[in-house]
Amino acid sequence: MLPNKLEEAWKITSENSVNPQNSGGFSALIEIERLDGVKKKYLLDSGWSYEWIDASFKREGIDKMLQNNEIEALIITHEHFDHFWGLPVTMKYAPNIKIVIPDGFYKEGLQYIKDSGHTGELVVNKKGRNDIEPGLCAYTFDVPIICRVFGEQSIFANVQGKGLVSITGCCHQGIIQFADTARNELKYDNDQMYGLFGGLHISPFDDWDPKYDDLVISMKKWDFQKIGCNHCTGLLTAEKFVRAGYPVIKGTAQYRTKSKSYLGNGDTITFG
């Protein structure tokens, strides 16, 4: 049924799913302003549920941005369902968009990109740093993760006068490797790890283990000035960050998001 019958395809998926209403997945719009004042947009991941992602894109105006070619590229962090399977919705509005994936996709995943209706350029980022434009890069971590998936890329942006903003889809590489890699291998303003946003994969199912407390405590050493918790961070983790006094930017708890400690559906965080 791909790429043109998404409603029928999702109906079949829903009928064969245990919890089809809990399959929104992750997708975030990144807008940057260059030093010359030009603004650029990038879409990070494309969610899971065709129904939910399409409704969200329409609600936030992403559909129009895609149709008008306002978004430079779709960057897929890794080959997991909740970041990748909603791809046909993005293709519905911009089949010619450039797609950037980390090295390690299976042949089935590459075929899914084609089946979703993609007609544009496909870029495969190798291990390590991959520059997107001045002050903005992707970094592919060479890491094995669940469901046989291998490799995840994250985004790093140098914000003038502030420092480094680190953006992650799931952070399967672990927050320590994620942040230490940025601190040791990238250059940025003020020598400051300024901002953090995304899924941090600390207790994503709120099944707290005492060892996670060490991860919460370890956050102090990077001295982030703004933290936006999202996706697989886990609500317990976000709440522990708040209690620990970290500069967590709270959300609105709209569109089915459970807590304001969490940047959820429709929320915005600004680092500039």
Image (cartoon, helix red, strand yellow):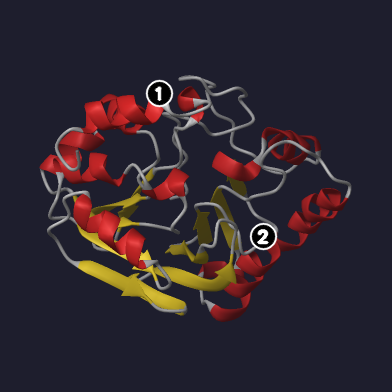
Q: Position of residue 260 (x, y in %)?
A: 61, 25
Decide if residue 73 is in sight here. Answer: no
Instruction: Name which quarter of the figure residue 120 lies in.
Output: bottom left
- The answer to whether residue 83 is above or below residue 24 is below
Q: Please, what is the three-letter code of the amino acid marked with disc 2?
A: Ile
- The quadrant in which residue 110 appears is bottom left
Tell me the crowding category of disc 2: few under 14, some 14 to 19, or many 20 or more residues within 10 angstroms, Cα based: many
- What's the amino acid at mark 1? Glu
Q: Position of residue 66 (x, y in %)?
A: 18, 43
User: How much space separates mark 2 and mark 1, taking CA atoms?
Assistant: 36 Å
Residue 114 against residue 143 in the figure, above or below: above
| Element at label 2 | helix
Q: List the residue tagged with mark 1.
A: 15
Q: Quadrant of the N terminus?
A: top left
Above or below, comparing residue 94 to residue 107 in the picture: above
How many marks can you see?
Answer: 2
Residue at the image point whose x is 28% and y is 54% from the top: 112
Q: Is residue 237 left or right of residue 50?
A: right
Q: Is residue 53 visible?
A: yes
Residue at the image position 70 percent from the left and 65 percent from the top: 176
Q: Residue at x 62, y 78 (%)?
A: 184
From this viewpoint, which residue is outermost toward the right? 210
234 to the left or right of 230: right
Residue at image mark 2 = 175
Residue in view at x 67 percent, y 60 percent: 175
Instruction: Using the image as rendered, state which of residue 171 and residue 131 is in the foreground.
Output: 171
Q: Earlier in the sequence, mark 2 or mark 1?
A: 1
